Amino acid sequence: ISVERYMKCGFGVCGQCVMDPMGIRTCVSGPVLSSKVLNMLDEFGEYHRDDLGKKHYFNNPKKDACEPGCGNSSECECG
């Protein structure tokens, strides 16, 4: 299955195209990935990444404020 991701460098250095939780770099390992690998990924339908790599959650916009481990758990719903 072909996966479309935003890519900056195109050879795996910047990390922009990494897919969670396995850390697959689609510019290096893809864009064609097996269905077995795609079934192990958990980001589909949860969020997308902008051109800076920041996650934007579809169902919980409060999580957009920061990333997991930010330390602001009283102000947002991170990690």
Image (cartoon, rainbow, N blue to C red):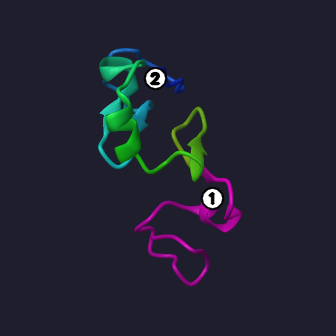
What residue sits right under mark 1 in the picture?
64
Which sits in the foreground, 32 or 22?
A: 32
Whether 36 is drawn above or below 72: the answer is above
What residue sits right under mark 2 in the picture?
1
Which residue is located at x 44 percent, y 51 percent? 42
Secondary element type, mark 1: helix
**Image location (x, y in percent) of residue 57:** 62, 55
Which sits in the foreground, 62 or 38?
A: 38
Which residue is located at x 60 percent, y 64 percent? 63
**Image location (x, y in percent) of residue 16:** 44, 32
Whether 47 is drawn above or below 25: the answer is below
Q: How many marks?
A: 2
Tell me, yes or no, whether the highlighted magenta stretch contains residue 74. Answer: yes
Q: Examine the image and state in which quarter residue 4 appears.
A: top right
Whether 56 is drawn above or below 60: the answer is above
Q: Amino acid at mark 2?
A: Ile
Q: Examine the image and state in which quarter residue 79 appears.
A: bottom left
Which residue is located at x 33 percent, y 15 percent? 11
Q: Amino acid at mark 1?
A: Asp
Q: Which residues are magenta?
A: 56-79
Tell me, yes or no, whether the highlighted magenta stretch contains residue 69. Answer: yes
Badge 1 crowding class, 10 Å Cα cut-off, few under 14, some 14 to 19, many 20 or more, is some
45 lies left or right of 24: right
**Image location (x, y in percent) of residue 37:** 33, 36
Magenta segment's dominant SS is: loop
Earlier along the polypeptide chain: callout 2 or callout 1?
2
Which sits in the foreground, 71 or 59?
A: 59
Q: Examine the image and state in which quarter residue 34 appears.
A: top left
Is label 2 or label 1 in front?
2
Alpha carbon of mark 2 to alpha carbon of mark 1: how far?
28 Å
